[in-house]
Image: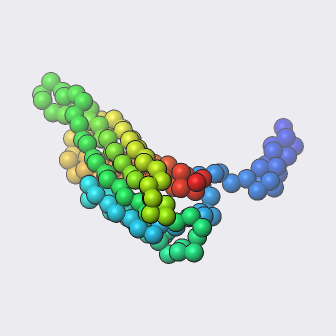
Amino acid sequence: MKKVLLILLFFTIGCGYTPVNQSSNKNYSITKLELDGNNQINTIIKKNFNRYNSNRNEINQFEIDLSSQLIKKTNSKSKTGKNSNLSIKIIVNSIILKEGKKFKVLNFEETVNYNSLDNKFELKQYEKIIIKDLTQKILDKIHFFLSTN
């Protein structure tokens, strides 16, 4: 049993395996980024895309126009009228330009349902974490698209 585990470990480490969406060698740069919509989401997106602005000598250079939207919704209420189940939906519409021409229009949507908390401060903090995580999922999809084109 230990030999099989050792051999399996040897092949996964020795083959140079790296996950596709975790690859650090991005072959593109962002020459222009325009953001519209929700400020909280746009701040996360801007911080994430800042690292791709400096690589002006890349072969693939893109201009990106993003519009973000945050929708908070109450799914159900308790007998006392308090919110018991909530949802957050993040919608990001993007227009990607390459060499000044419209290259692709991408629309992303991520949703999560969660239970309400009695402490409002903790609920706000939890919602901030959810928004950051959902935005990061969308950013991963955008980066994957840009790195494969």
Q: Residue at x 24, y 30 (%)?
A: 75
Q: Is residue 117 visible?
A: no
- Closest to the observer, 104 or 122: 104
Kindly give the residue lying farthest to the front in the view shown: 101
Furthest toward the top, the residue is 79
Which residue shows up at 44% across the image and 63% down it? 100
Q: Is residue 57 above or below residue 35?
A: below
Viewer-proximal residue, 148 or 99? 99
Colour option used:
rainbow
- Name the residue at the right extreme: 3
- The residue drawn where x is 19% and y is 28% is 77
- Viewer-proximal residue among 74 and 6: 74
Q: How many marks?
A: 0
**Residue at 25%, 50% in the rendered image:** 124
Residue 146 spot, x, y in % from top left: 53, 56
Left or right: 63 in relation to 14: left
Confirm whether residue 90 shows in the render: yes
Residue 28 is situated, as x and y percent measured from the top left of the image, at 56, 64
Left or right, 131 with respect to 49, comes to left
Q: Is residue 36 above or below residue 82?
A: below
Task: Name above or below for residue 134 compared with residue 113.
Answer: below
Q: Nearer the viewer, residue 121 or 103?
A: 103
Q: Position of residue 56 (x, y in %)?
A: 53, 74
Which quarter of the image is occupied by the C terminus?
bottom right
Q: Residue furthest left?
A: 80
Residue 15 as seen in the image, left or right of residue 35: right
Q: Which image quarter is the N terminus in? A: top right
- Residue 134, placed above or below residue 50: above
